[in-house]
Amino acid sequence: MAKGLKQMNASIKNVDCVIEVHDARIPSSGRNPIFQRTLNARPHLLVLNKMDLADLSNKQRILKKMEEDGVRNVLFTDCLKQVDSNVKKLVPMVQEIIKDNPRFNREENRDISLMVIGVPNVGKSSLINSLRRTNLKKGRASQVGGEPGVTRSVLTKIQVCARPLMYLLDTPGVLPPRIESLETGMKLALCGTIRDHLVGEDVIADYLLYTLNRLGMFSYVERYDLQEPSDNIQHVLKRISVKLGKTQRVKAFTGVGNIPVVIPNYTEAAYDFIRAFRRGELGQVMLD
């Protein structure tokens, strides 16, 4: 983390605008406060990605909360979509944001330089690839993945637009050194920003079940052939393992010998439950 921040700070003087990418399902939770110093140094655009997975029925409330937090430039995107009309708005928005801001040592440069920052696995590299697909009709320049930590270091400049000439720096995801609360930490883990094994698939699955029940989202009941909603994660995972065939054979030691028995694979069931949520198969959700 320290290395990534050092690289960002060294590059910020050559940047016209900072693009902060975050997960639209948690627009307020988990944004790294360490970025504030960087954001205050340059014009800032907040991109809330994965909008296809978020419940945006109360979008105006989200925008009002962002404005109260000092964020006035917000763009919702779905960067994995082959053609996202919102991604097309990014270049004009950046031009408008930076037009009245001094460029200091970049006054003579005709190109526009951007830096993408954010916590892990929110779609920073996907945004770069989507911009290239939209503006240059070219393939991806940054590796993407469903696990946090795919981008390891600040890369060289990547062209994302020809008119105007615009380049962008990809950066590694950087989590806050201290997460503000247990609730925030669980939201980040549920959205895949923290590696599953660091929290535990069973713990994340339990929080997911609690969240779905709290929000009245019961699609999991029909999906996994439950009789009714349940707050017992062991019962739910058992049903998932049976439905999906996620079982394992073990030996039970008894007084009359070893007897092979079949038991649910709770870890595999938890992983399937979490993955279904992250793919949006359990419904769109707003966690904040």
Image (cartoon, rainbow, N blue to C red):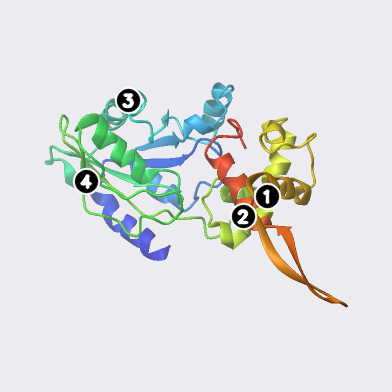
Residue 41 seen from this side: no
Residue 268 falls in image quadrant: bottom right
Q: Residue drawn at (30%, 26%), measured in percent from left and top?
A: 88
Tell me the quadrant of the picture where the N terminus can be found: bottom left
Q: Is residue 4 above or below residue 85?
A: below
Mark 4 residue crowding within 10 angstroms, few (<14) / some (14–19) / many (20+): some
Q: Amino acid at mark 1?
A: Ser
Mark 1 and mark 2: Cα distance apart in space:
7 Å
Q: Residue 71 versus residue 172: which sits nearer the camera?
A: 172
Q: Are marks 1 and 2 in contact (CB under 8 Å)?
A: yes
Secondary structure under badge 3?
helix
Residue underneath mark 2: 268
Residue underneath mark 3: 89
Q: Is residue 146 left or right of residue 261?
A: left
Residue underneath mark 1: 241
* Lower position in the chain sequence, tag 4 or tag 1: 4
Residue underneath mark 4: 158
Q: Is residue 275 above or below residue 227?
A: below
Q: Is residue 30 above or below residue 62?
A: below
Which mark is nearer the camera, 4 or 1? 1
Residue 211 seen from this side: yes
